Image (cartoon, rainbow, N blue to C red):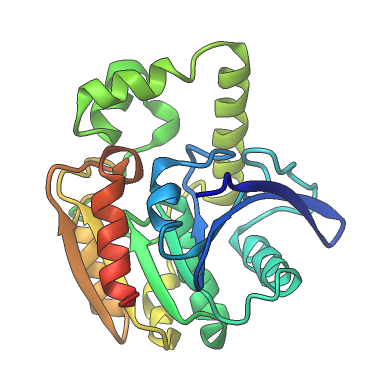
Amino acid sequence: MPEPVSEFIEVNGLPTHLFRGGSGPPLVYLHGVAPAGEWLPLHDCLAQRFTVYAPDHPGFGRTERPESLEGMDDLVLHYDELFRALELTAPPLVGFSLGGWIAADFAVTYPDRVSALVLLNAAGLHLDGALIGDLSALAGRKLAETVFHDQALAREFFGARRGPEARVEQFRALTTAALLAWNPWFDPKLARRLRRVSAPALALWGEHDRLIPPAYAHAYAEALPDCRVEILPGCGHMAPIECPEAVADAITRFLRV
C-alpha cells in the first residue's frame, strides 16, 4: 500500500494538516487529545478498505491554533469548511474521545453532511454515576493506568513520546483541550440535541475504558435515533493504539464495506 500523503489544506486562512491514505470510499477520522499529527496502525487498517482522511484539529499536531478558536462550535464550522475544500459531501465520521465529541456536534449541526457516525470512547456527555477523569490532573503511572488496559503497551506508547518536543506538544494539546472543553468537560445541551442526527451510529467502546466508562456508550445509544453499541474486549480508552485491528473490523462491519 502506498505511503499516506501528508498535506496542508487552507481553511479560512488556517493551514490545516491532514494525512490522506488508502483507497476506496472516503472516511474521516477525528483524533482525541492524543495522539495527533500521526498516521497510526489503525489508519493503516482502515486504509485497506477506505480512503482515510486524518486531519489535525486546530491547536493539535501540525495545525496551529488560531486566536479565533474559542469553543466546539468553532471546530464544527472549521470542519464544515475543510470537508467542502476536500469535496467530501457526506462522509462517515469516526471520532475518538475528544474527536467523538466533535463528530457528534458536527452530526447535530449538519445532519445531512454525515452518512454514518462512529463514536469511539467518545466524550461530550455527562452521567452523574460515571464521572469522566480530568486528563490535566493525571500523570505518570496514574495516567497510564487510566487510559490503557495493557500496561506494556502504555510503557511503549509513552516511552516513544518523551523528550522536550513531546512535552511541549502534550502541553499544547492539553491547553487547547482545556480551551475547548473545560468546566464542564461535556456539553450540557448535546444529549437532547442528538435527536437531530439522521445518520446511523455506532457507539464503539473499550471494555476497560477507565477515563470515559462504557456507560457512556449506552447513554449515546439512548439519545441517538439510530445507534447500536459494541464493546471491545481487552481494550481500554486508547483502543486505537491497543486494538487497532478490532476497531477497524468493527467499523468495517458497521459500514458494510
The residue at 50%/73% (across/down) is 25
The residue at 44%/87% (across/down) is 196
At which x and y percent is residue 37?
59, 39
**Residue 129 sits in which quadrant?**
bottom left
Q: Is residue 47 above or below residue 79?
A: above
Q: Residue furthest left?
A: 233
At which x and y percent is residue 148?
26, 33
Can residue 212 be seen by looking at this rendering?
A: no
**Left-right relation of 158 to 132:** right
At which x and y percent is residue 202?
29, 71
At which x and y percent is residue 145?
23, 27
**Left-right relation of 172 to 39:** right
Q: Residue furthest front?
A: 1
The residue at 45%/31% (across/down) is 136
Foreground of the two, 170 or 161: 161
For the C terminus, which image quadrant?
bottom left
Q: Residue furthest right?
A: 13
Q: Is residue 99 above or below residue 203?
A: above
Foreground of the two, 124 or 1: 1
Can residue 1 be seen by looking at this rendering?
A: yes
The residue at 80%/47% (across/down) is 67
Q: Is residue 226 above or below residue 35?
A: below
**Left-right relation of 16 to 182:** right
